[in-house]
Image (cartoon, rainbow, N blue to C red):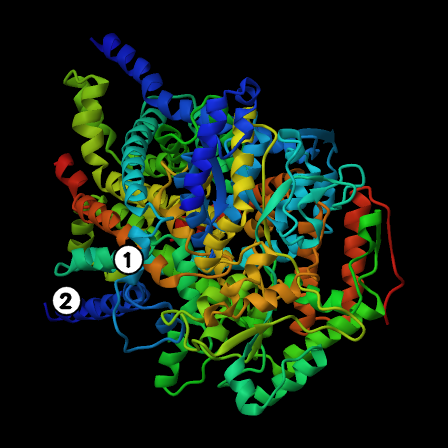
Amino acid sequence: MEKTGFQRQLVGIVFGVGVAALLAFAGGAAHAQKVAPITIVINQSPWFGGFSKAVEAYERETANKVTLDVNPFAGSAEKQRNSVRSRQGQFDILVMNSTWLAEFYHGGFLTPLGDIDPSFKLDPQVLSYDDTAYWDAKTKSNNARTGSLYGVPLNGNIQLLFYRADLYQQAGLKVPETWDQLMANAQKLHNPPSIYGMVFRGARSASDISYDWMPYLHSHNGAIFKDEKAGDFTVTINSPEAKKALDTYVDLTRKVGPPNPGSYGQAQVIQALVTGKAAHGTPVIAAWSQMDDPSKSAVVGKINVAVLPRGPGGKPSPTLGHFIGAIPKNIPRDRQVAALAFLKWFQTVQAQQIVANAGAPPIRKDVLESELSNKPENRWMKAMVDSAPYPRSMYTVPEGPQIVSVLELRLNQAVIGEKNTAEALNTIATEIQEIMRKGGYKTGKLPDLK
Amino acid sequence: MERIRASSLGIHSVLALCALVVIFPVAWIGVAAFKTQIDLLTGKVLFQPTWANFDELLFSRSSDYLANFLNSLGVATASTIAVAIFSTLAAYSLHRLRWPKWVPATVLLWSAVFHMLPPITMVGPWYLMFRSVGMDNTYSCLILTNLALNLPVGVWLMSVFVREIPIELEEAARVDGCTTPQMLLRIVFPLVMPGLAAVSILVFVFSWNEFAVALNLTAKQTATVPVAIAKFAQEYEIKHGVMAAGAVLSAIPAIAVLLLAQRHIVKGLTAGAVK
Amino acid sequence: MDAHLLGDARRWRYYALAPAVAVYLLLTALPLANLVAMSLHDIRWQGGSADWQFSGIRHFAELGGDQLIRAGIANTVVFAIGAVTCEMLIGFFLALFTSRVVTGRVAYRTIFLLPILIPGIVIGAIWKLMYNPDFGVINQLLSLAGLPGRDWLGEKNLALASVIVVDIWHWTPFVFLLLLAALESLPQDVFEATRVDGATAWQELRYVTLPMMWPAIAVTLLFRLIVSFKVFDEVYLLTGGGPGTATEVVSFTIYRRFFTEDRMGYGSAISLVTLFVLALLIVLALYGSRRFSKET
């Protein structure tokens, strides 16, 4: 509140001096002047509460007007696509999930933020999320050095290892750092049907099993492509590393999973955790808000989170499922300016404290490390900071959803026993190579696994 | 007499059994509206009822349920009335006003083909059309699209009922000097009432529950009930209780329409008229 | 006088048809033309605008190699035939019985129509909970009866049947309502006449009720088949097409290809082919049941 008063005073002084040039540039000076009303298109989610609190504070503080168009998840993508493809866009800030980010970058629908205000930069305290806020149109990759800034991360959603801290204490277990250690711990706690050692997003959907398995792949030093950032799309998903990663995953589902792991989606994983049916799971941090809520959870205070385990010789590799706020090309200049004013404000410490206080994950490292993280209900913050160097994008090409659709089916077939792991990976490699060939990429694939 | 009583007892027991099977999931949804998420997830039979779901549905910040409700009410009522009138008129014209054979065939075929298309393929073109004339996010565009979506079923069904009107009745009326509008009001509409009531119930329910198109053609101010309810089926959390509460409230107007309209599904109007 | 009336009828034949045709021309012509155009093109977005590349019939040629489509069409046909047959039979007999009883008919009618009032997305979410193997009410009831529970949506060979059950529950009311209205609008004197002639209930059903209701039955069947081919909401929340491809249905494949993967050309091609298959199926179904109704 004090700060606001000071800012208003400052504004008064600036106007008092009457710098004429400032008037022409007034739209850009976000805190100084009322800007055009904007509409943000966003999906309903567990972190929406924190975001809308921040929006309220912004409106109070600046007297700028913000309308929130709140939608179901898939519906938000649909509406954004419609809007950017029409002659004049309906929305001023697109809240984009990583699943449709590539489509919007490649389609050329977004404005580089530097075109609106050359001085705008991402605050160094904002976590990088694998450079996904930057886009290099020439090399068609997310690259902070060579690309331009197109957006501001609004929510850092990544996977963490959720585990039953109370059972760990009873059994004297240590938080696992590798998948093998996790298997050992899960086997000790596996006692079906009353509790499963671990639950998985093994189902086939728009994005369940592929997202769940990605950290195994990356942390075994495997990858879908040889070198995406350098434009080499040779398919390497049928490498021995990938096979080890899939064997580890399938082995876990068979030895410590529920009877039909191939039918669990994210909602079922969370359901198993909150009902006390599962000792481990790797859902996204967005699920956290349900763990400690007595109306939603039978295990309040009993669950803790840690950085994901890793494979031999690899690094922990949570997959990004985060959200970036970006500004479309097809809206008038004054609305672009107003939209940037909000993004600018949203990355400040003050805004991020509001977000964190409302129980949503902030995007700033300093806020995640502040005294807020000492509160017991914020015990997830440390794991978020510790995970910060590792997140990986699932894909950066607009063909991503097609690739995911292949992965979903074939991985699911491996889990439910319709295919062995080598067969599944060979099929995936063939099908992905075909997708890339059709898309005109430089591609190829490794020899089949046996 | 004896046989009739026995068979009516049999009929009643079959109907009652079916009613039980049908109503069980409905009742379960009704109960779910008063359960907390954890009680629902763990399948608790005895539980502490709560208003929290209704509270979140009606009063949380991201919810405009009451407004959505009124939007749905207006849109569904308007589209139902329009479909009822347009489809009866069209059916009457096609089957009783002596078109060459290819005309009714084409119209009916076109309706059926259009009805086969998945909504997701129509949404994009419709959005661009309405946006280019500045009609996106209006009630009129929602009513128009619901009209287009439900007209096929209306025209086909009303064709069935219109063709059952005895032709002698019409001829007699013509001889008496009845004009076409008089004929429609005095003979056609009264005689097709059972069918029209059934069609109206269906069209109301379909427009009320229509989701794919409403999602894309509405914004905050014009959003309808299904769009509001779908927000609670999130990627990370399916709020079953709130969705159930939304379904319970959303069923009220439909039940009212049902009770109102089904009084017109009564026996023997045609028979009476012939005599 | 006669000539005047004929003129009136001729004018009204246009007036009465005009609104419906206007709606069709305005709202269906463009999307359908657009769909056909898209199916013959590759559409890529670059620099904020669409680049349409003519692709001929390539999308249609690709269909054969798409495993999801093959599974989807097979499942959809099983789904449609299984669900619609049950719905028609149950709906018909419920309508017949309900029209016979005097006491409680309003209650029966209202109850039998309830499921259709519930939004599809809620039905999906709630049935998923009821089917849950650990806490679901269905397994709870089974265990009360001393029977073992199953994982209704998780087992490959059960999943499609479980989805069909939900569809029957959801859509039988549609059949019930329309056939009830048709039954009630039949002329009663015919029934009285047959009863006076001493026909049994079965004879009455076979020689009077069924033939007279045939047009209503055919149209109801037509629309049930069409809508069952478009089944989406239930599958979306219940199984997402899994496990494996056990419950993959065509409309879901279309949604995935057309929307999720943004392959509008290919997605349109699938829609058009599905439309063709569906039309074929309907012609067969109507032809078959018309022959049946002629024989009876």
> Which class describes the residues within 10 Å of circle 1: few (<14), some (14-19), or many (20+)?
many
> Helix, strand or loop at disc 1?
helix
Of B227 and C248, the residue lying toward us: B227
Q: Residue furthest bottom?
A: A171
Q: Which residue is mark 1?
A: B54
Q: Is residue C271 left or right of residue C120?
A: right
Count of labels shown? 2
Q: Residue furthest left?
A: B1
Earlier in the chain: of badge 1 and badge 2, it is: 2
Q: Is residue C160 left or right of residue A427?
A: left
**Above/below status of C19 relative to B37:** above
- Residue drawn at point x = 42 percent, y = 21 percent: B100
> Which class describes the residues within 10 Å of circle 2: few (<14), some (14-19), or many (20+)?
few
Q: Quadrant of the N terminus of chain C?
A: top left
Q: Which residue is mark 2?
A: B4
| Label at residue A374 | none
Q: Chain of mark 2?
A: B
Percent across and percent down for residue B104 are 42, 28
Percent across and percent down for residue A304 are 53, 75
The Cα–Cα distance between marks 1 and 2, rounded to whole angstroms, is 48 Å
Of A395 and B205, the residue lying toward us: A395
**Above/below status of A415 relative to B259:** below
Percent across and percent down for residue C15 are 32, 18
User: Splitting the image into 4 quarters, where does residue B95 fall?
Assistant: top left
Q: Amino acid at mark 2?
A: Ile
**Above/below status of C166 relative to B114:** below
